[in-house]
Image (cartoon, rainbow, N blue to C red):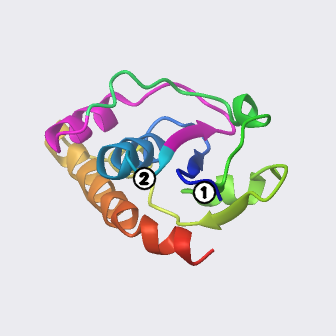
Amino acid sequence: MRERPTILFLCTGNSCRSQMAEGWTNHIWGNRFEALSAGSAPHGLDPRAIAVMAEAGVDISGHRSKSVTEFFDSPIDLVVTVCDRAKGTCPVFPGDTKTIHSGFEDPPAMAKETEDEEEALGFYRKVRDEIKAFVEGLPEIVNNI
């Protein structure tokens, strides 16, 4: 691995979980890792994801939803799939790219049946905090792969 490894967080839509993971990684470990995110079927950035990350002091409003195909020719050291569907469809990257899975629940799906916005945001906050905890452990994960 390079001195500053590149980590690609992969999800289906690249709208929420992978965006949060990219944001947390660059916020916490920007001097140690370069984080990117992509989706197998990107469909735009989730406004609730932007809102709950902003609450935590991380601005992802400038992110955009990207296709994993944009990174096929890029040097990626580690791919982290953050949803089960992406795990099942993760492409093979050339070279020594490692792949791991750390699945998180889907906030938009959980929020569909909510009665109000605050309840919906609660699901996003829960997953945001779970992703942060995962990201905080990235140095150990990277050292062990």
Residue 32: assigned label: 2
Question: Hey, which quadrant is residue 67 in on the image?
Answer: top right
Q: Which residues are magenta?
A: 35-58
Residue 5 located left or right of residue 109: right
- Quarter holding the C terminus is bottom right
* Residue at x 22%, y 44% (from the top left corner): 121
Q: How far across and how far down the image is residue 73, in percent?
A: 79, 34
Density class for disc 2 (Cα within 10 Å; few <14, some 14-19, many ≥20) is: some
For mark 2, give the secondary structure: loop
* Residue at x 80%, y 49% (from the top left corner): 93
Residue 115 located left or right of residue 111: left
Task: Please state which of the two labelled residues, at mark 1 or mark 2, is closer to the viewer.
Answer: 2
* Residue at x 57%, y 78% (from the top left corner): 144
| First of labels 1, 2 by sequence position | 2
Density class for disc 1 (Cα within 10 Å; few <14, some 14-19, many ≥20) is: many
Tell me the residue that label 1 is attached to.
81
